[in-house]
Amino acid sequence: MKQFPPHDGVALAFFINPLHTPSTEYPETCRGILSLAAHRGALATIRAWDGYEVTPLIRAETLAAQMGLETLWIKDESRRFGIGSFKALGGAYGVARVVAEATVPPEDITVACASDGNHGRAVAWGAKRAGCRARVYLPSHVSAARAEAIEALGGRVIRVAGEYDEAVAQAAADALELGMTVVTDTAYAGEEDIPRTVMQGYTVMVEEALEQMGRDRPTHIFVQGGVGGLAASVVAHVWERAGPPLPTVVIVEPEEADCLLATARQGRPTPATGSLNTVMAGLSCRHVSTLAWQVLERGARGFMTVPDDAVFPMMRALASGLAGAPVEGGESGVVGLVGLQAAASDPDLRSALGLNEGARTLVFNTEGATDPGLYREVIGEDRAPRRG
Ligand SMILES: Cc1ncc(COP(=O)(O)O)c(C=O)c1O
């Protein structure tokens, strides 16, 4: 792996993916995971939900110029369905499908999931919408505020001692014993159907962004990775919808939760090497989603990690108007932009990735203040962007 020297205080690890095939058509083998046909189903369902609104696509002209890029778009998910992250699109779509296909009434259904916070909130919200119950398994590092947000939606929170993976295992075991249906956002052996649906829900966000761009298309996309489901949805939808060549997609992870980078280095699913101890709570994952990796192994050009200490400054900068107007970006929300800024200020990476004055770049602010207390602490009480 090439190690780049620190720039602007951000020490980068970066890996160029040798398996990348951006000039081919969207691979036939990936169509069973994410496809335009499945996307249309998700779009039709989700658009019909109460409260559906297209989220803003911000064009951050000054910031783009500061980074020496032609354009920077920020797709802002901080207000999605009032639950604060893009995850609403996936978890709730998974629940809707479970309920639609069930042979019993919704009140007799309990869905279960493991979560670092946002997916659990999405599932609890989806369960409330669909009239069923939800149990959410949270690993010990997840904050009390995130648990409370799930409970406020009627979800039952079960605390699990250990990492996210232990929560996944506990949710699966309890589901078997208690007759619950698992709505997981990560795919693993024997559990691929629902995570596929969850990822199909995320493609609604990608489609909105492409529509908002009109005839413009990004040349580069920097997207944060937890288990890789979000990134796979972005890659698959842009690839199939817009055709080859695929834009240069770079996956950005926390230094301490680098499962996608470790996987790319080995060319097969490989656990994160870090401690998982990171402020980027939504990205704190040990293992990749096996389905997501099948898309990313051909579609992602690069994998990089960023350190925790780059995150709070970016949250503050966005809140104070770095993008032209104040943007509420949470700890896992701003990570794609942190990665882009770090790469754009590294001469070697700029040239390796073709990040230059002609680059039209896209990032996703995937969450707002999903942990409001922490957000206020980071930003300062009086500086938080006002809710519209
Ligand atoms: C705010 C936020 N952004 C990004 C991600 C990453 O998504 P994925 O785990 O599908 O890679 C998550 C995952 O929970 C998240 O909560």
Image (cartoon, helix red, strand yellow):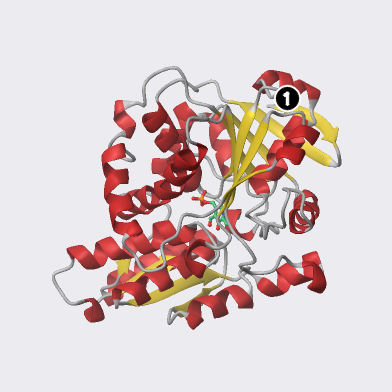
Which residue is at a point 46% across and 49% down the rendered structure image? 205
Residue density around tag 1, few if under 14, some if 14–19, many if 20 or more, within 10 Å? some
Say above or below: 128 vs 357.
Answer: below
Say above or below: 337 vs 67.
Answer: below
Q: Quadrant of the N terminus?
A: top right
Say above or below: 93 vs 288.
Answer: below
Q: Position of residue 346 (x, y in %)?
A: 79, 28
The residue that label 1 is drawn on is: 349
Which residue is at a point 60% across and 42% down the rendered structure image? 363
Q: Is mark 1 within 8 Å of ligand 1?
A: no
Q: Is residue 190 visible?
A: no
Which residue is at a point 50% across and 82% down the rendered structure image? 152
User: From the viewer's perspective, is 284 left or right of 377?
Assistant: left
Q: Position of residue 322 (x, y in %)?
A: 77, 49
Callout 1 amino acid: Leu
**Which of these two is toward me, 268 or 364?**
364
Q: Secondary structure at mark 1?
A: helix
Q: Position of residue 173 (x, y in %)?
A: 36, 68
Q: Quadrant of the C terminus?
A: bottom right
